[in-house]
Amino acid sequence: MFSQNFFRSLLYQTQESYHPRRLHKFDLYYAMGVTTLFLLVGGYAAIHHEMWRDEIQAWLLARDSASIFELFANMKYEGHPAFWHLCLMPLSRITASPVIMQVFHLLIAATTVFLFTYYAPFNRLHKFLFAFGYFALYEYAIVARNYALGVLLITIFCVLYRERYKRFVWIGIVLILMAHTSVHALIVTIAIGFALICEYLYFYCCKEDALTENRRQIWIGFALIGFGIVTAVLQLKPPADYGFAVGWHFKFEIQRVFNFIKIITQAMLPSPRAAMGFWGSHQLNSYPLFQLIRLPLCYLIVFWCVLRFLKRPTALLTYLIATVGLLAFFYVKHGGGIRHHGFLFTTFVMTSWIYYDCPEIKLPFNRISELAQRLFSPVFIAILVVHLLGGITAIRMDIEHIFSNGKRTAEYIKAQGRQDMLMVGHGDPQVSTVVGYLEKDQIYYPRGSRFGSFVRWDKARTGSVSNRDVVKEAKMLSTQNSQDVLIIMSGALNVSQIEEYQLTLLEKFTGSTVSDEGFYLYLMEAP
């Protein structure tokens, strides 16, 4: 009898019992304990994680931009606002090693976990499962990208939301920063801003109550939100010579629509395969039954969320605008990967958090909404268990397998004392990973015909460059400078090219989670 009551209370425990107004000392100890364990697990995993090109690209941009103005100019080609890179700039002045970025990123993730486990209105089982789930433990903790900063700011917004009209300027500041972390966080910011202004105009604006004295601060907060959205959008406007993902897909194709709706299950139920190529994979998709029910399951998840939020219009508007906005962006611009799709899950968690502090309206079918809400705890636990298994699998696979060969290649070059050589790299996105780990100022990239460290995604590098062209340009540089040249290739040269130019294959590094980040090192001796 005791065990039945215990598990029933665990599954159906209402969030109000863990609401911030009832925080106790144990809640602080619990949050600190979970965060400490998270740092231990995450730190061990980060040590074994070899960063790939997208992680290193941000580091090189911050490191090799001489000023903030130059950084903003370089960021025009990135498709993201610059807040993450601005945070990295002072770190890059401390050391040229990108490892400091990993430490900083893990601390951001740990801060998110602490705030979530201390303030979120969920029970302790929910909090533990979330902290060690796929996105919190791996995607937004170990893989050092700008997305974790957006998730942290979403969490801070949720903490402030309960007393939003007393701290609306702070809400505005948080949303400005959030909008400048990524295009996906910008979409969530737009959803929040629209829902908040609708809430204020409908429920509070014309009422003579305590909000009257804060009206000026509230409108300042809305102005800040608008400013953040506009400036982030302006940053995302590409320059005339932009050369990456330039197309838009506005043509309506029903099968394409269905395919992108299915992303919801990938975000809500991340299940990487237990193999080297785990990243971005979805084990559940390998089961025919899941493939059969995948689309109806997406509809069911959205319908259930709509029923839950019906009597809380702020939560409903935020959820629908953010979810539809993200899916629309994936459809028309860039389908993205699991790291981008995770914002669909983050939106679900965020709206479930603020739900209890949203103003309520009475509906003739309130009981249906209440029933959907009563199912939240067991359904959330089931979802988070999948996340926990996904997080454990991802951490284990990242430790067991090499994520990218960029670090190994750089270590080999340093061990051979060749780090100061004249270098030629092809293809440039992959080779930039080696450059970051070498802590080297620049190498020559045949695509674009220029020296550099980070990749500039402009039209100059969109032309085709063959392996023979690469070797020819290396030969020219070797002759001009009377120096040996180290050629770093992301693919192997053929035997005839090696013999014709009298190259020496020094070493090759192949086999990694990011499959195209294998490298071949060739030495071209000066004539």
Image: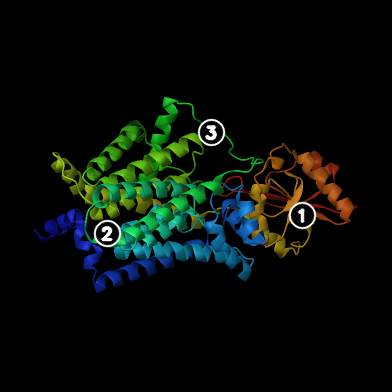
Numbered-mark total: 3
Residue 499 % position (x, y): 83, 43
Residue 72 % position (x, y): 61, 54
Looking at the image, which residue sits at the far left?
1
**Tag nearer the camera, 1 or 2:** 2
442 left or right of 124 in image: right
Q: Nearer the viewer, residue 341 or 319?
A: 319
**Tag nearer the camera, 2 or 3:** 2
- Residue at 64%, 41% (x, y): give it: 242
Q: Nearer the viewer, residue 211 or 334?
A: 211
Kind of residue at badge 3: Trp
257 left or right of 198 in image: right
- Residue at 63%, 68% (x, y): give it: 93
- Relative to 316, is 19 above or below? below
Kind of residue at badge 2: Thr
Residue 348 % position (x, y): 33, 48
The reply to whether the C-beta atoms of the residues labelled 1 and 2 are less than 8 Å apart is no
Helix, strand or loop at label 2? It is: helix
Residue 159 found in image quarter:
bottom left
Earlier in the chain: of badge 2 and badge 3, it is: 2
Earlier in the chain: of badge 1 and badge 2, it is: 2
To which residue does mark 1 refer?
Answer: 423
- Relative to 387, is 29 above or below? below
To which residue does mark 3 refer?
Answer: 248
Kind of residue at badge 1: Met
Earlier in the chain: of badge 1 and badge 3, it is: 3
**Tag nearer the camera, 1 or 3:** 3
To which residue does mark 2 refer?
Answer: 212
